[in-house]
Image (cartoon, rainbow, N blue to C red):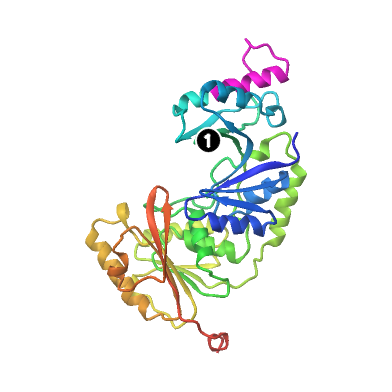
Amino acid sequence: MKENFKLVATVAAGLESVVGKEVKALGFDCQVENGKVYFEGDVEAIAKTNLWLRAADRIKIIVGQFPAKTFEELFQGVFALDWENYLPLGAKFPISKAKCVRSTLHNEPSVQSITKKAVVKKLQKHFHRPEGVPLQEIGAEFNIEVSLLKDQATIMIDTSGSSLFKRGYRIQKGGAPIKENMAAAILALSNWYPDKPLVDPTCGSGTFCIEAALIGMNIAPGFNRSFAFESWNWVDKDVVQKVRDEAEQAANYDIKLDISGFDIDGRMIDIAKSNAQEAGLSDVITFKQMRLQDFQTDKLNGVIISNPPYGERLLDDKATDILYNEMGTIFAALKTWSKFILASDEQFEKKYGQKADKKRKLYNGTLKVDLYQFYGERVKRHLIER
């Protein structure tokens, strides 16, 4: 089996730089491209990145890349790859995904079928199995993915299983919730630090607050879940356990955090509390039912992060306009606080009453949104600590 792998962390558009910084922070050189961060590493690297990357979608092994304009070229290219170094006899290996973009081959089901046939034939040859006898797929699962971009095929194996945004703590959710990895990425973009107060005044199911607490306490986001690669026979279980043990030791459960979430909907506050309890953070975060109009604070240098209701989460556009206007009025008094607000309304700044210092295009699932960033006035630390 291989000892070193070409790896790629997939990421939502607009967040590549965040994941690139995360990968580098774990000690790996990387190359950042649209929707992808490439790096190399061993089994320990696979374990570390799955466990620690907060903003990525998945970690995949790149088995090979080659040009493929015809089905024959695709078949021969897949057949030539060293599948015996990845798939043991008896492995399940569905071709779980094929994506064709600006390529001669565009029929994705056919691409999946040809890829499957090529892998089967290669394994039959390597394990000396007759071609007419189907391979038994009764073991661990290796999900194979095919990407065709401008007639260049990339063949990958997904190491993550469920997408990395599935931390394991969200037992309930509200309408159109923000994904956990998107929330973590926005927190990274906000430059929030654990010594600053953080408030989500439209907290919904509590994702921003919970992700902030995980960051503040240095808890690995994937600590309470499993990954596909952990069931593979060539993965050294001692190496994976070592990575998990190191993550547990790295957590700082004693740090004092000032994280609060408010929502007008008491049902959502109950859901947020349940999710925080599932994450083991119910004593760390303050959740309270409260109207946006009632929010006020004397604290300085805080951060407000909000994914206010929009689209399917509201009954009409008028309610959206009122909400944005209220936000602008209430937040204007918090001059030392930075505000980071997600909105899909292109007229948000006009309704909010202030032009953003910076705007970043993102995708909340398939919905295109903007992150409006308003930076607070700086206050010297000795004034904060009075």
Query: Residue 120 magenta-drawn?
Result: yes
Is residue 146 shown above or below 356? above
Is residue 221 shown above or below 115? below
Span shown in magenta:
114-136
Q: How many marks?
A: 1
Q: Secondary structure at mark 1?
A: strand
Camera-nearest residue between 52 and 150: 150
Tell me which amino acid carries mark 1: Ser
Q: Position of residue 327 (x, y in %)?
A: 33, 71
Task: Kindly identify the residue that appears in the image at 44 percent across and 29 percent down.
Answer: 106
User: Image quadrant of residue 7?
Assistant: top right
Task: Kindly identify the residue that appears in the image at 62 percent across and 15 percent down.
Answer: 134
Task: Kindly identify the residue that appears in the image at 55 percent across and 58 percent down.
Answer: 18
Task: Kindly identify the residue that appears in the image at 64 percent across and 18 percent down.
Answer: 121
Residue 241 seen in this snapshot: yes
User: Image quadrant of residue 27?
Assistant: bottom right
Q: Quadrant of the C terminus?
A: bottom right
Q: Quadrant of the N terminus?
A: top right
Q: Position of residue 319 (x, y in %)?
A: 25, 62
Q: Which residue is disc 1 drawn over?
A: 147
